[in-house]
Image (cartoon, coloured by chain):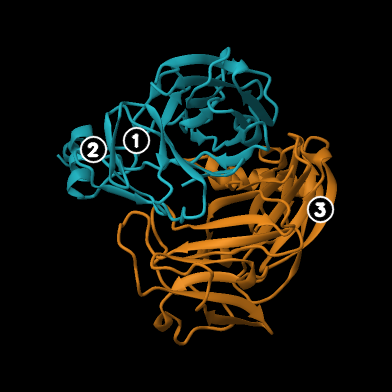
Amino acid sequence: MKSLVKFFANSNFAVKMRNTLNIKPQMYNKNIPKFSSISDSFAWRTDNSFKTIFKFSDILDLFYNIENSYVELNFFNKNNEVIKSMEIKNLDLSNHLIIDKKFFNGLEDYGFFNIFHRSNDLKFPNDLISNRCYLGFSFKNNLYSFVHGNNFVSYLMNKNGKIGEDIIKTSFIKNQFYRIQKSFDCYDKVELFVTNPTTKKIYVSVNNENYTLNPKYTKIINIPKKEGEILIRSNCTFLRPTVFTYKKDFIDVHHS
Amino acid sequence: MNYFFGINNDVFKSKLTIPKFQNRIPNTNKDIQLFKCYPDKNEWKIEEMHKGNGFSNNFFIFDNSEIKNEDIFFLSKKDDLNNRDKQKLDNYNNFTDTTPSYRANFEIYFTDKNKLGFSSYQSEYPYNMTKIKGSIFTSVSSIGNREAEKNYILLRNIFEKPIHQVFNAYLVDIKKKCVLENFKLKTNYSNLLKLKNEYIKPEVYFITDKFLGIPIYISEKNGHLSMEHTHPPHTHILSGNKFNLVKNLKERVHEIIS
């Protein structure tokens, strides 16, 4: 009986209701199967004179001495359409990938991508692994400004190659607050790079401006200069955008 | 509880923006106070900070004139500090114990005013890290940038005892199993090290011996700046025996330096 109650209490509907009523709210899915590789929704930009560098380590080799592992990458545009998929084999301990217009055959846009670590043999660890990785954003061909991954969004089960979603949960109403702990008074321009981490439509207010984000859609939100602070209200339990701040041609990118 | 820190030397200055609010609550705590703390004659000296160039309703904002490499900052109420132990940092209050973590914005800029670049990240130093000794292990090429003119590692340590103890850090080639460079660092200090571009390679790791810290990578080119920290290795594994896996890895690396 106890396990039946637990089963219903952890169903998608019940978790959403718990998050709505703030009764034992659940920010993350805690039942991700082992033998899985978890990924962030990593931001990429080739719009507006940006290029992106992605740096990642071979964590299967580093921690488990698994040779011949590889990574699977799936790139999505801002409307959640797959625009490129690839595997990278022959990994070094640390690796990088440059994502510029040329990488997407001239496309100037933005979106997100996932990275999953994979192994063909039976050595994939009986663990959950997640590569935090680092992104660098170069504006007008200047120095990359680096930021680390900051969320868990999707996972790939190594045994069958299936991808699981909705690690981050939602509620029925916009009762989730995130107040960025930084003052934005002194910048020429501020952008929030937001990707919906769920497969549900989410509703977002940024300083009382309302936005709707379809499942896995990405949006760059410009913050008006007069607004020195940023308060995000949504029905998503963990919506933490990447922040781009500008002073002339100098930029600073960090997670919020 | 979290502590915050900056840097102030002949290469970089810093600005700290410490919020008076938690990140999932829209209200500001108007009663919270800001304290500066530093080791002096084997005691932790604590002073309340009353001035900054941008103290406002919602933030404590201050810069290099108020920041030294020894200083740490924390939020508290004066009453929480009654009967404190001057020989040891403590967990003075739980205002900064939040999920996601309570953070301040730590921004660096050049001491040379002709260079206009700036870079920041949302920063904190958890109290629990001040109580333990250990070693850090971080890939130099994860954020180090070979295309930059200069690269640095800023290693910030905060240790519970009010002392400046010297400890070692190394650049190690884990494939060739050799030490490339040895650095002397000190506890309770923002240590800035120059990182030679030739060492920014996949097989090179930065490790410390005996003391923990937050490894922060800084690169500069044409007056532009980038700063970001790396994660402890155990954060890559979310289940199972992660601490044993990391321990084994560190033991393998420590054989190289011993």
Q: Which residue is mark 3?
A: B258
In the image shown, does B121 or A170 lie closer to the viewer?
A: B121
Q: Which residue is mark 1?
A: A31
Query: Which type of secondary structure does the marked residue at label 1 adopt?
Result: loop
Q: Is residue B237 above or below residue B30?
A: above
Q: What amino acid type is highlighted by mark number 2?
A: Asn
Give the chain letter at badge 2.
A
**Badge 1 local density, few (<14 within 10 Å), some, or many (20+)?**
few
For the point 30% across and 37% down, the residue is A169
Nearer the observer: mark 3 or 2; the answer is 2
Nearer the observer: mark 1 or 3; the answer is 1
Q: Colour of chain B?
A: orange
Query: Which type of secondary structure does the marked residue at label 3 adopt?
Result: loop
Residue A25 position in % (x across, y down): 25, 47
Q: Which residue is mark 2?
A: A10
Q: Give how far apart the Cα atoms at labels 3 and 2 are.
A: 50 Å
Q: What amino acid type is highlighted by mark number 1?
A: Asn
Q: Colour of chain A?
A: cyan
For the point 50% across and 31% down, the residue is A43
Give the chain letter at badge 1.
A
Mark 1 and mark 2 lie on one chain; the one further toward the N terminus is 2
Residue A96 position in % (x across, y down): 66, 28
**Badge 3 local density, few (<14 within 10 Å), some, or many (20+)?**
few
Q: Give how far apart the Cα atoms at labels 1 and 2 are.
A: 10 Å
In the image shown, does B67 or B57 lie closer to the viewer?
A: B57
Give the chain letter at badge 3.
B
Residue A45 position in % (x across, y down): 53, 28
Query: Which type of secondary structure does the marked residue at label 2 adopt?
Result: loop
